[in-house]
Amino acid sequence: MKKEFKAESKRLLDLMINSIYTHREIFLRELISNSSDAIDKIYYKALTDENLTFNQDDYYIKLEADKESRTLTIIDTGIGMTQDELEANLGVIANSGSFAFKKENELKDGFDIIGQFGVGFYSAFMVAEHVTVITKALGSEQAYRWESEGAEGYTIEACEKEEVGTKIILKLKENTEDENYDDYLEEYRLKSIVKKYSDFIRYPIKMDISSSRLKDGSEDEYEDYKEEKIINSMVPIWRKNKSELKEEDYNNFYSEKHYGFDKPLRHIHISADGAVRYQSILFIPEKTPFDFYTKEYEKGLELYSSGVMIMNKCADLLPDYFSFVKGMVDSEDLSLNISRELLQHDRQLKIIAKRIKEKVKSELLNILKNDREKYEEFYKNFGRQLKFGVYSDFGQDKETLQDLIMFYSSTEKKMVTLEEYVTRMKEDQKFIYYASGESVEKIDKLPQTELVSDEGYEILYFTDDVDEFAVKMMMNYMDKEFKSVSSGDLGIENEKIDETPEEKEENQDIFSMMKEELSGKVKDIRASKRLKSHPVCITSEGELSIEMEKVLSAMPNGNEVKAERILEININHEIFKGIKEAFETDKEKVKIYARVLYNQALLIEGLTINDPVEYANDVFKLMSK
Ligand SMILES: Nc1ncnc2c1ncn2[C@@H]1O[C@H](COP(=O)(O)OP(=O)(O)OP(=O)(O)O)[C@@H](O)[C@H]1O
């Protein structure tokens, strides 16, 4: 009976089969990589299960090309699949969650599809019109045959197969003007594809290779014969010498492993011979994985013990703030049998994790120093993660991360590091100033930044939710304290703005009256020490800023925290003169002023006002008075 693919799989499969795809040849890489994974699984079992004995020679992958029937067959001695596994693994292309992330029109390019969804096996349909999978699972008596011609569906039935393992038979598509599928039956072509993408596969990839030799007893007569040969070098790339490897080799490895659909921004190749022996290849991706900032994203590195993969995503090897790092670690000093729980406490693993953390940090610093543009690109994608790192775990990693974070600068008009900021601070400047807001454009217009900007000080713009929380955790950098431009004491003396004692005395009563009108809304009303041309602004007192309040109250369980608001009034502004006048002649008007100014300050700050109708009426009243 023919079964249909799950709806999403069908759409995806259609797209893939019909996409004009320039790298069709990678279907072989995908199938070989699946075979290699399947052998890894059985090999691992054999090493850890006393009841199983296997010889190294038992593990291999074999390619068979038959020109007559136009089939290419990939055979492996891996773990095989049961009927249920066939159904589960080859009946659904991608798990629907990840598929939902991409809209159909974004799926034009086949490369994207493969990289992002791990639809490895289905790439077979880029070259084959009919695919047959014959497989027998370890420990199972019965073998099964899965067959499909693409989007129409598939069948599964019982069949005969001697040995455990899987055999995939591709009946190649008819040749077209653009593509000569017969090419995939040619020895030289298959050999070169294997060399290019699968050279380092640890198991032998065998193929019958034609040669010719002198006929027995003859001196000039040759005969053709076939001989089985291993066509890959089998040395894993991480065991090779760095000097032997080219950028391209690392890039191929990155794609082969499906670490990402992009090209890596940087690779790090570690070969350590110290207290713990291990090799590692790490990648810093160029682009943010599509699910990076979602719950679905899982950090981790592949973990191998002496070349055998023991864990797909070992999370303990990476701190959360470097969760974007992809790659693998292979160590001879780790036990094959180690369980997840034990691994967490493994001393060796801790040493490796620490070293990886340091390496990634120094590589990032290196990019920052030598390739600023690249770093800024990286930072755009993953900077938020680093800032979360500063903030989380009570700031225990702030030292590691503080030199890697950047903010937009008011004076430089670009991203700058904290070190750059501090080293060009003015002599009399006491603090590292920052202003928080939704975007650079919005912060540019904030009244609170006026004085600090006018004094010629640089201001860092905090546009990410996490920013202010992160610097609160850091407290200072190179002994300089962070200071919000909205905070009470800015450490700037300015005679023109500061209230004289007489003024203070004089304004006292006005402010008290306004404060009474705004009771419950603001903690205090003061003459501003930062406003020059704007009449009013809101600032906060204490640990919690208005921006932080916004972030916290936007959280799902609606934190009801409120910043302590201070209404600051520019006593040198025309408007304040009006208030003073009203205080003498029309006390009711002072109250209206208080309400209007408060609401306007909220609006400037990007906060909502409680009663817009009352506000509008107040404004009308002032306009008509
Ligand atoms: N030769 C094989 N032997 C045993 N199982 C296989 C074989 N080929 C595929 N499978 C099973 O089918 C599943 C689906 O394969 P597919 O290539 O579509 O995705 P994947 O290998 O899981 O993901 P990715 O290709 O992104 O690593 C595999 O995870 C594996 O369980």
Image: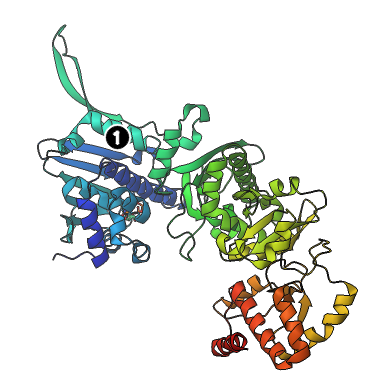
Quadrant in which residue 545 is drawn:
bottom right
Q: Is residue 309 above or below residue 463?
A: above
Total labels drawn: 1
Quadrant in which residue 151 is drawn:
bottom left
Amino acid found under the numbered disc labelled 1 = Ile
Disc 1 crowd rating (10 Å Cα; few below 14, some 14-19, many 20+) is some
Viewer can see residue 163: no
Q: x, y percentage for residue 502? A: 89, 76
Give the colour scheme shown.
rainbow
State the residue at coordinates (46%, 50%): 287
Is residue 157 found left or right of 394 in the rendered image? left
Please tell me which residue lies in front, 347 or 565: 565
Name the quadrant of the N terminus: bottom left
Viewer can see residue 593: yes
In terms of secondary structure, where does tag 1 sit? helix
Please tell me which residue lies in front, 330 or 110: 110
State the residue at coordinates (72%, 74%): 540
Q: Residue furthest top?
A: 219
Is residue 335 found left or right of 128 in the rendered image? right
Please tell me which residue lies in front, 113 or 133: 113
* Residue with the mark numbered 1: 193
State the residue at coordinates (28%, 49%): 110
Q: x, y percentage for residue 274? A: 66, 37
Q: x, y percentage for residue 464? A: 58, 63
Under 8 Å from ligand 1: the CB of mark 1?
no
Q: x, y percentage for residue 329? A: 53, 45
Quadrant in which residue 535 is drawn:
bottom right
Name the quadrant of the C terminus: bottom right
Please tell me which residue lies in front, 505 or 623: 623
